[in-house]
Image (cartoon, grey):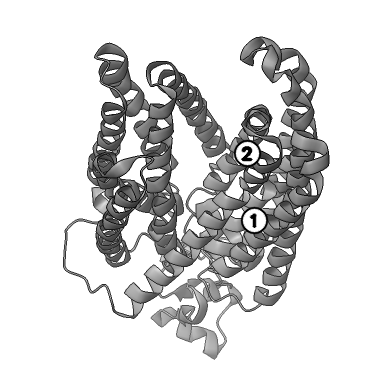
Amino acid sequence: MFGQTDRRTFSASTSTVATGCSVAAMTVATTGLRPSPGIEAAPPVTPNLVRPKEIPGARNVGRNTVETLLFRGVSTPVAFALVVIQSRFLDPSGRGRFVLVVLTVTILARLFGQLGVAVTSLGHGEPDRALVRRALGWTMALGLGGVGLILAAGAAIDSFGLPLAAIAAPALVPNILNACFSGVLLGAARIRLWNYIQVLPPVLTLAGMLVAVVGLGRGVDAAVAVWTLAYFATAVFALAAASDLWLPLRNVPLLDRQGRALVRLACGMGVVQIVNLIGYRVELFVLDRFKGLAAVGIYSVGMQAAEAIWLIPAAIASAITAPVVHEDAAGAAQLIRTACTKGLVYTSAVAVAIGVAAPFVIPPLFGDAFRGAARPLAFLLPGVVAYAPVTILVVYISIRAARPRLSLLVSIVGLVVTAGMSLVLIPAYGASGAAIASTIGYAAGAIAAWICFRSLVSVVAGQDTRPAWRSTGST
């Protein structure tokens, strides 16, 4: 019933049509599935057509979005509690060592952690076991290579040193593995399991730190060890819960055409993540250079409050990934447009509420020294709202269309504009100038993303070769 397979066969009684039988006898014509002798008196319909295959996650976009927001509602305060524990129970230098070594692992995890998303893109949303096994094989290869890089960084960087790097480096492998399964699960619309994998590391890390750091007072080495063990425990859970995606385990070539395409696409997406990570923070380095650490501290409060709004479009993007990958070209584009509209409306409403409340909430919550964060926050909010749909657009650009280079272009545009405007505005206006520079950069990135999306839609229209899960048969 799909495309070229839409053929009709006829029962023996159908041959009477050619000899002038009544029109009622024509209804015994059947599809190639089975004869239908009992429908002669029925209206001229085709009750035995194959029911269209349901698009995974299409019915549950709203529910999955709310569920993801609820899980984020758990992980966000947990992350805040971790910051409080590290600040109070580790001395400033210990906190700095923890942040630097974790950031080193995180950078490589961002670079190598897109293998699952690449599986979803190349497999058109279908969890192909062969592709998943290749992704797991590349996870081990890249993860072990990355461990060596982290150890080398520890030996070269005195800020955290080789011993602490040796504790943190093994966490790279389970970190990438968890990200791999997460990408595949998104494509299969298994949002609840995806959410469990996202929330487990911070929750387990918090529990471990309460014991090792708060209870036993073991310091930064114990804090990093707990963080590493949390990722290993989550990886064990992911392997067991998603065993249907990769078992039975078989040898698969990593360097064949599919394997090379997989790692090439994944690394392209990873580079986008790295550029994004730098682009979101480039103004901090300029602000530190011209105004000092105190200005960075004040600005960072407003920045974190503003960027928390992105939890909303991120949840929407997670919920629509599977439907967008499975839909036909027109349906996928329309779904993206609808999701972007909702993302803009929701983030705008939240941004207005945050902007109004900030001058009254920031001083009592963070202290009077941070009262000045309300002004940069007000300048940041328009840019954060404008950039919110980009998270959703990237689902189409990088995953549906498998064009991570266009996503990279969007990130580079935002990075270059933000850096340039920071050099112009920060010397004169300080933290407020940094916020304005970021807003201009966010707006430029958003415009670039919309241009890329519209260009892809116009090119793909009428040329999409992906299976649309709907019947093309007719009577």
Badge number at residue 121: none
Quadrant of res 350: top right
Up-down: is 376 above or below 30?
above
| Residue at the image point whose x is 54% and y is 35% from the top | 63
- In the image, residue 54 lies at what x, y percent? 49, 54
**Label located before the other in sequence (2 or 1):** 2
- In the image, residue 41 lies at what x, y percent? 54, 62
| Residue at the image point whose x is 23% and y is 49% from the top | 243
Amino acid on which disc 2 is placed: Trp
Quadrant of res 335: bottom right
Front residue of this view, candidates 157 and 309: 157
Up-down: is 42 above or below 374?
below
What residue is pinned by disc 1? 393
Residue 283 visible (yes or no): yes
Front residue of this view, candidates 7 and 77: 77
Crowdedness of circle 1 by 10 Å Cα count: few (<14), some, many (20+)?
many
- Residue extending furthest toward the top: 364
Image marks 2 and 1: residues in contact by CB distance under 8 Å: no
Front residue of this view, candidates 347 and 53: 347
SS for callout 2: helix
SS for callout 1: helix
Would you say 154 lies left or right of 75 here? left
Residue 188 visible (yes or no): no
Up-down: is 388 above or below 18?
above
Amino acid on which disc 1 is placed: Leu
What residue is pinned by disc 2? 310
- Residue extending furthest toward the right: 428
Which dot, 2 or 1, sits closer to the camera?
Answer: 2
